[in-house]
Image (cartoon, rainbow, N blue to C red):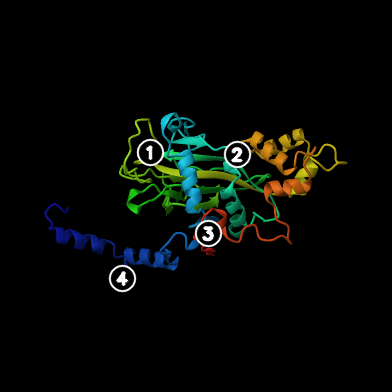
């Protein structure tokens, strides 16, 4: 019994209990076992290396989204007043298995889904994911802006499984004007989605930061602190109309992308019901886009029609322009990301890959 023992005697008794025959303690054995598996060295910045979680990659690229583009998206879709401050938002679940709605979402028009951010994703994805190739199509199935308040609790989830259509990559960039570490709001990656899962990698929603990862990795968004101020409040405001409340919120622009398993030629031949003309009619293009799970089919059709210059049917070259596919002899898609994103003073530091 330890009832009559002093604290020092209790500690000594427990220490002796841990010492088995042979003189080595259980503590020593645990320490040796941990050290035998190596040391997990954390870099000073999450964007200085490519991360691997159970063999699936996560890449954090700072400077991918230029300040001009970040500001344009924030002012057009987030920092709004009047009726537009409320319109377009809906509650959404993290996944079909979620018990509650986790955040506010605003689905983006097609031109935003197939815009500047996708161009950067198309350029970066082949560097980080072996199943993404520059000569194969990459497209967005859906894109949305998410607004998560300090009381919205996300749940661990995976976005999509890979299938015969393509390798799924989730791309997230953050339109916040500023972000401090003590505000929280991290996108976190976990060892799984069970109750005993471990948090493995947190990524802060810093302005213009782009996050690319294998969509099969379990992840979730942590709520921001109530004191978070992602956008600077106006110095003077006489506006009495309703306005977007940004304090205590975090914002993210999410693109769900697929790297195709088929070439543009294969897709055209599969959906061209009249092989003699080697063109896709409007109905055939519609069938193709629905097969690819593109959410905004009408917008995709309008863009393809513009590329084809209104001709009766889209050729393989038109489809390559639509998907921005590069052949072996073509020039690089965009050697200067900062300039493409409207900020030619913000260079990208390409990350070295850690296996």
41 lies left or right of 308: left
Sequence order check, earlier mark of 1 and 3: 1
| Mark in front: 1 vs 3 | 3
Relative vertical location of residue 157 with respect to residue 65 in this rendering, above or below:
above
Sequence order check, earlier mark of 2 and 1: 2
| Mark in front: 2 vs 3 | 3
Residue at figure coordinates x 67%, y 56% from the top left: 134
216 lies left or right of 134: left
Q: Residues within 10 Å of mark 3 (few under 14, many from 20)?
A: some
Find residue 226 and report its horizontal and vertical position in percent.
Answer: 31, 42
Relative vertical location of residue 26 with respect to residue 319 in this rendering, above or below:
below
Mark 2 falls on what kind of element? helix
- Residue nearest the observer in this picture, 55 or 213: 213
Sequence order check, earlier mark of 2 and 3: 2
Q: Which residue is mark 2?
A: 110
Q: Which residue is mark 4?
A: 23
Find residue 178 and report its horizontal and vertical position in percent.
Answer: 39, 51
Between marks 2 and 3, how big is the CA–CA gap? 25 Å
Question: Is residue 262 visible to us here?
Answer: no
- Residue nearest the observer in this picture, 139 or 246: 246
Between marks 2 and 4, how big is the CA–CA gap? 69 Å
Furthest-bottom residue in view?
A: 23
Q: Which mark is residue 149?
A: 1
Find residue 272 and report its horizontal and vertical position in percent.
Answer: 80, 39
Q: Residues within 10 Å of mark 1 (few under 14, many from 20)?
A: many
Image quadrant where residue 308 sits: top right
30 lies left or right of 298: left
Between marks 2 and 1, how big is the CA–CA gap? 26 Å
Question: Is residue 2 visible to us here?
Answer: yes
Q: Which residue is mark 3?
A: 344
Task: Determine contact: label 2, label 1, CB under 8 Å.
Answer: no
């Amino acid at each position: 019994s330890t009832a009559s023992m002093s604290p020092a005697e209790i500690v000594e008794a427990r220490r002796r209990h841990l010492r088995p025959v042979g003189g080595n303690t259980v503590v020593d054995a645990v320490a040796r076992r941990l050290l035998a598996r190596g040391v997990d060295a954390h870099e000073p910045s999450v964007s200085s290396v490519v991360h691997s979680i159970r063999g699936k990659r996560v890449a954090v690229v700072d400077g991918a989204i230029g300040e001009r583009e970040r500001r344009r998206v924030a002012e057009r879709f987030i920092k709004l007043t009047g009726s537009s401050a409320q319109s377009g938002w809906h509650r959404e679940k993290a996944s079909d298995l979620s018990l509650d709605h986790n955040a506010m979402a605003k689905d983006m028009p097609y031109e935003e889904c197939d815009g500047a951010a996708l161009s950067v994703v198309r350029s970066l994805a082949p560097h980080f994911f072996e199943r993404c190739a520059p000569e194969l199509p990459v497209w967005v199935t859906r894109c949305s802006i998410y607004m998560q308040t300090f009381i919205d609790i996300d749940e661990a989830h995976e976005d999509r499984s890979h299938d015969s259509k393509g390798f799924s990559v989730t791309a997230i960039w953050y339109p916040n004007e500023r972000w401090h570490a003590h505000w929280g709001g991290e996108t976190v990656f976990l060892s799984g989605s069970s109750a005993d899962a471990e948090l493995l990698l947190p990524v802060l929603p810093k302005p213009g930061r782009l996050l690319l990862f294998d969509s099969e990795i379990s992840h979730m968004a942590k709520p921001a602190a109530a004191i978070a101020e992602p956008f600077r409040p106006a110095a003077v405001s006489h506006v009495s109309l309703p306005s977007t409340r940004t304090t205590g919120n975090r914002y993210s622009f999410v693109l769900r992308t697929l790297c195709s398993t088929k070439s543009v030629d294969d897709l055209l031949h599969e959906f061209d019901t009249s092989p003699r003309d080697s063109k896709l009619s409007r109905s055939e293009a519609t069938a193709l886009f629905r097969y690819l799970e593109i959410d905004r089919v009408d917008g995709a059709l309008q863009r393809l029609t513009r590329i084809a210059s209104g001709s009766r049917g889209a050729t393989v070259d038109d489809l390559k322009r639509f998907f921005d596919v590069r052949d072996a002899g073509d020039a690089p898609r965009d050697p200067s990301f900062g300039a493409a994103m409207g900020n030619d003073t913000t260079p990208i530091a390409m990350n070295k890959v850690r296996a």
